[in-house]
Amino acid sequence: MDCQSSHTFDSDESDIDIQTEIYEKGGSIDDIRNDLDFCLRDDDKVAEQSVVDFPMDGVEPYIGMEFSSRDEAREFYVNYGRRVGFTVRIHHNRRSRVNNQVIGQDFVCSKEGFRAKKYVCRKDRILPAPPITREGCQAMMRLALRDGGKWAVTKFVKDHNHLLLSPSKVPWKGSGKNLSEDEKDKRIRDLSLELYNERQKYKRKCAAYEEQLKTILKELEMHTECISNKVAEVVKSIREVEEEEESKGLNERWI
């Protein structure tokens, strides 16, 4: 997350403190200047260290805000929701049509949307219906993947249409127990690739089985034709024998 920190000094108070330190320690002006130069050279390091050690509590999302990953953005919005008084739900994501990579992600209030009618108007319900948890809240934070791998906030809706909880009453949902968004995305890609490979394997097997079946049917057709020819020859022979016997019988009658 891109952050900036600045240090301001009051000139009068700074001069008084420096003069007092010179008087008490008996140091020279040059020594103090060297110390100040050393502090100014390390000012950037101190600011960078302060960003790492102290997260920006109380910061509100804004359009253009950047994060290094979806997990970082999720943690930020979850912490923001805890401070404000609502829980966060991961909404649908958007994927690239080129490589199926996730390029957009929405984080919404847990009261977003409404319960489906098939669950509200159930006639076969035995137990009392659970309390309504979705009230059509539109509060959300939308992310988009930028060049360089950064995730930027492209839409932020602050207002909620329901009462907010106090921070102490917001249910705790530990994100460490679940897979990260990047791990989920990687697992989905791996499973999709595995499914594709299995389909290709079955297609190759089906093609081989089809060729074998065609060969068997062709041989069966040839065998059937051969048997038909033999049966026809046998029938022809039987008819010839019957005709010979009939002709012999007629000759014997005439004699």
Image (spheres, grey):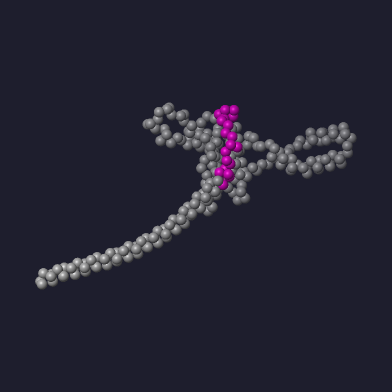
Residue at 50% in and 36% down: 112
Tell me residue 81's x, y (percent): 58, 34
Confirm whether residue 222 shows in the render. yes
The N terminus: image quadrant: top right
Location of residue 31 by image quarter: top right
Where residue 85 sits: x, y (%)? Answer: 57, 31
- Residue 50 relative to residue 103: left or right: right
Q: Is residue 181 magenta?
A: yes
Quadrant of residue 169 in the image?
A: top right
Given the current orientation, which residue lies at the most extreme right position?
Answer: 26
| Residue that sits furthest to the left in the current view | 254
Is the C terminus in the top left, top right, bottom left or bottom right quadrant? bottom left
Q: Nearer the viewer, residue 63 or 94?
A: 94
Q: Residue at x 83, y 40 (%)?
A: 35
The reply, left or right, for residue 79 in relation to residue 92 is right
Q: Position of residue 191 (x, y in %)?
A: 52, 48
Residue at 23% x, 66% y is 238
> Along the line of sight, which residue is nearer the eye, 252 or 60?
252
In this view, 76 is above or below 167? below
Nearest the viewer among 133 and 26 is 133
Residue 21 magenta? no
Q: How many numbered tags mark residues here?
A: 0
Q: Residue at x 43, y 36 (%)?
A: 116
**Boundaries of the magenta span:** 165-186
Can residue 62 be seen here?
Answer: no
Q: Position of residue 2 (x, y in %)?
A: 65, 43
Q: Quadrant of residue 216?
A: bottom left
* Relative vertical location of residue 240 with respect to residue 7 in this rendering, above or below: below
